[in-house]
Amino acid sequence: MAKCAICEKAAHFGNAVSHSHRRSNKMWKANVKSVKVKVNDSANKKMYVCTSCLKSGLVERA
């Protein structure tokens, strides 16, 4: 679910490194919102869109 419908941005993985340099798994999720979007001038569709796509104007809200 945490995947942008516009730019396909999704979660990515890496290591959390503590002060003593012990490593554990960490996951960063995309900041994805559920938004009603205008599609084809008449229909409105609910999609998951990341906030960077919303801010840059790639999507027009309904």
Image (cartoon, grey):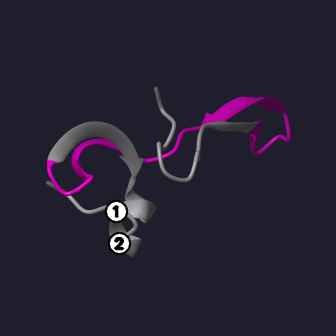
**Quick check: 53 above or below 23?**
below
Residue in the image at 49% along x and 51% along y:
6
Asked which quadrant contains residue 25, the reply is: top right
Q: Give the percent coordinates (x, y) of residue 24.
A: 77, 27
Q: Is residue 19 magenta?
A: yes
Q: Give the percent coordinates (x, y) of residue 58.
A: 40, 67
Q: Are marks 2 and 1 in contact (CB under 8 Å)?
A: no
What number is the disc on residue 57? 2
In the foreground, 49 or 26: 49
Mark 1 lies on residue:
54
Q: Quadrant for the C terminus, please.
A: bottom left
Residues under labels 2 and 1: Cα distance? 5 Å
- Numbered disc 2: secondary structure: loop
Magenta stretch? 14-42
- Numbered disc 1: secondary structure: helix
In the foreground, 44 or 54: 44
Residue in the image at 56% along x and 53% along y:
7
**Quick check: 23 above or below 57?**
above
Q: Main secondary structure of the magenta part?
A: strand
Q: Give the percent coordinates (x, y) of residue 32.
A: 40, 44
Check disc 1: other Cα within 10 Å, few if <14, some if 14-19, many if 20+: some
Check disc 2: other Cα within 10 Å, few if <14, some if 14-19, many if 20+: few
**Quick check: 62 above or below 35?**
below
Q: Give the percent coordinates (x, y) of residue 30.
A: 51, 45
